[in-house]
Image: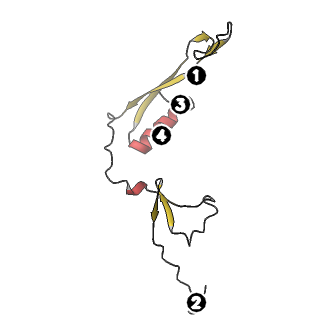
Amino acid sequence: MVPLNLNKLDLRDYLYNVYNIKVLSVRSFVAQSPVRQDKPDAERPKPRKWYREKAKKYMIAEMERPFVWPDVPEDFAPWVILLPCSSHGLYGVDWEHTDEWRVLGGTKKLTMQPKRSKSPSGRP
């Protein structure tokens, strides 16, 4: 089952770029839900009010080789994103002088090296 706005080229591109699998062909179809009288979770049933649940889209891909789920990585360091902590958001941050950084939801203290000035007097 895939989102309704996904097309065959998107699925082929996704499988190739993320999992490095070549797709030979893709078949897709949209399964419509049956029409019902009123919503199933309505408080008061209303006669002659028609309701149809959202359609579901299915895609079947013929691949060059069988798909095998990749192993879970032991080290998540390549995916850690450091963002400065600030109540003003990313744009109100003094990037050079902050020493609190948010790492995947938690805070972590990092030591920041001061910038070296180019002038011999020590002033920027």
Report the Cα–Cα distance between label 1 and label 4. 26 Å
Report the Cα–Cα distance between label 4 and label 2. 52 Å
Q: How crowded is mark 2: few (under 14 residues within 10 Å), some or many (20 or more)?
A: few
**Residue beneath disc 1:** 54
**Residue beneath disc 3:** 3
Tag 1 near tag 2, CB within 8 Å = no
Report the Cα–Cα distance between label 1 and label 2. 66 Å
**In the depicted structure, whether residue 5 falls above or below residue 71:** above
Report the Cα–Cα distance between label 3 and label 2. 58 Å
**Residue at 46%, 40% in the rendered image:** 14
In percent of width and height, residue 69 lies at 33, 38
**Residue beneath disc 2:** 119
Q: How crowded is mark 3: few (under 14 residues within 10 Å), some or many (20 or more)?
A: few
Q: Residue 13 carries which label?
A: 4
**In the depicted structure, whether residue 72 falls above or below residue 83:** above
Foreground disc of the pair 4, 2: 2
Mark found first going from the N terminus, 4 or 2: 4
Which of these two is toward me, 70 or 26?
70
Mark found first going from the N terminus, 1 or 2: 1
Q: Is mark 2 on a helix, strand or loop?
A: loop
Q: What element carries label 3?
A: loop
Amino acid carrying mark 2 in the image: Ser
Foreground disc of the pair 3, 4: 3
Tag 1 near tag 3, CB within 8 Å = no
Foreground disc of the pair 1, 4: 1
